[in-house]
Image (spheres, rainbow, N blue to C red):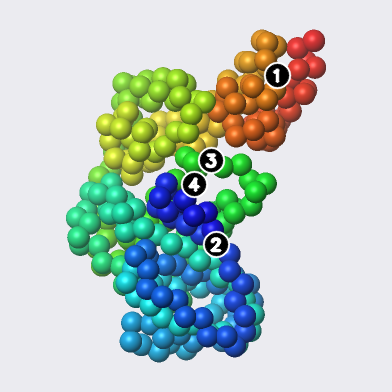
């Protein structure tokens, strides 16, 4: 689990191996907890919120335990759980972005919820556990926001987002200039939303409609273009170009270039000669 994720993006995640026949007591937390079952089905039982639940837990089944509730779980075979913590502060921000009263959003215990979007988000967040995957704050922050929205949509209140067509020319220009000026920094969705003077929820929808891709992908594309320009100039070593363009390291830059341009930095350098 990334210990600082709860503080920086409002979500933390870990992959936990569960031993068959062992009762796992999970104490109450100040954060909401989600458990996504991964792999073969098992017979499971749990005690939570004063109720006992027995069921066959299948791949993709999701348990949601609100903040303040404890419980114990037991499975009849070894299994793996993707466990996520979601901060109430993130839920409140997502509700405000969706223009609903956060106090109307009540997260209730849910067991065996089927939600392909939550499952996809959980697996994508779990990729951040790998040291081989470069950290990309905008990407993981987008996933965290999307997760909070899905949790809210399963709560008592349903969000009502106003329909808007696209960013205005002024908003588009301001965002493009801001991103270009901050490519070497750790950009966040909150910063981009403030530049456009709209909520994060609206930013994600309108940005895609206006730029043709989500914010995190646009930022990566612009970083690749910045790196390509610096490579053609031939005045800096690859390691410095990577940092100047905002990549975590040289291999991160190479991976992104290969994916977007279809060529590596080495090929671009040879083309320059």
- Which residue position is annotated with label 4? 140
- Relative horizontal placement of residue 194, taking residue 118 as reference (left or right): left
The residue at the point 28 percent across, 43 percent down is 163
**Quick one: SS at disc 4?**
helix
Instruction: Give the foreground label among 4 and 1.
Output: 1
Q: Position of residue 61 (x, y in %)?
A: 51, 73
- Relative horizontal placement of residue 75, taking residue 104 as reference (left or right): right
State whether residue 48 is above or below residue 63: below
- Which residue position is annotated with label 2? 14
Q: Report, in whole angstroms, how far the alpha carbon at label 2 lies from the one at label 1.
A: 37 Å
Dividing the picture into quadrants, the one containing residue 202 is: top left
The residue at the point 62 percent across, 15 percent down is 229
Q: Report, in whole angstroms, how far the alpha carbon at label 2 lies from the one at label 3.
A: 18 Å
Mark 2 Cα-neighbour bin, 10 Å: few <14, some 14–19, many ≥20: some
> Which numbered dot is residue 136?
3
Front residue (pair 212, 232):
232
Labels 3 and 4 touching (C-beta < 8 A): yes
Q: Position of residue 158 (x, y in %)?
A: 27, 60
Q: Report, in whole angstroms, how far the alpha carbon at label 4 lies from the one at label 2.
A: 14 Å
């Amino acid at each position: 689990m990334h210990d600082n994720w709860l503080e920086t993006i409002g979500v933390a995640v870990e992959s936990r191996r569960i031993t068959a026949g062992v009762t796992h007591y999970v104490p109450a937390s100040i954060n909401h907890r989600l458990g996504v079952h991964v792999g073969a089905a098992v017979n499971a039982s749990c005690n939570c919120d004063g109720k006992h639940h027995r069921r066959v837990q299948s791949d993709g089944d999701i348990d949601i335990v609100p903040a303040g509730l404890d419980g114990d779980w037991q499975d009849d075979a070894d299994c793996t759980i993707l466990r996520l913590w979601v901060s109430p502060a993130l839920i409140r921000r997502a509700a405000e972005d969706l223009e609903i009263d956060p106090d109307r959003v009540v997260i209730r215990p849910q067991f065996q919820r089927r939600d392909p979007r939550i499952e996809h988000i959980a697996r994508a967040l779990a990729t951040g556990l790998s040291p081989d995957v470069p950290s990309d704050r905008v990407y993981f922050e987008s996933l965290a926001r999307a997760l909070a929205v899905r949790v809210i949509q399963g709560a008592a209140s349903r969000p009502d987002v106003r329909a808007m067509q696209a960013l205005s020319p002024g908003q588009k220009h301001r965002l493009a200039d801001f991103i270009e000026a901050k490519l070497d920094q750790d950009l966040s969705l909150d910063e981009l939303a403030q530049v456009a003077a709209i909520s994060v929820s609206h930013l994600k929808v309108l940005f895609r409609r206006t730029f043709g891709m989500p914010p995190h992908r646009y930022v990566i594309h612009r970083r690749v273009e910045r790196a390509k320009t610096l490579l053609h100039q031939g005045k800096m070593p690859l390691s410095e170009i990577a940092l100047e363009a905002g990549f975590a390291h040289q291999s991160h830059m190479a991976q992104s270039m290969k994916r977007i341009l279809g060529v590596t930095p080495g090929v671009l350098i040879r083309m320059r000669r």
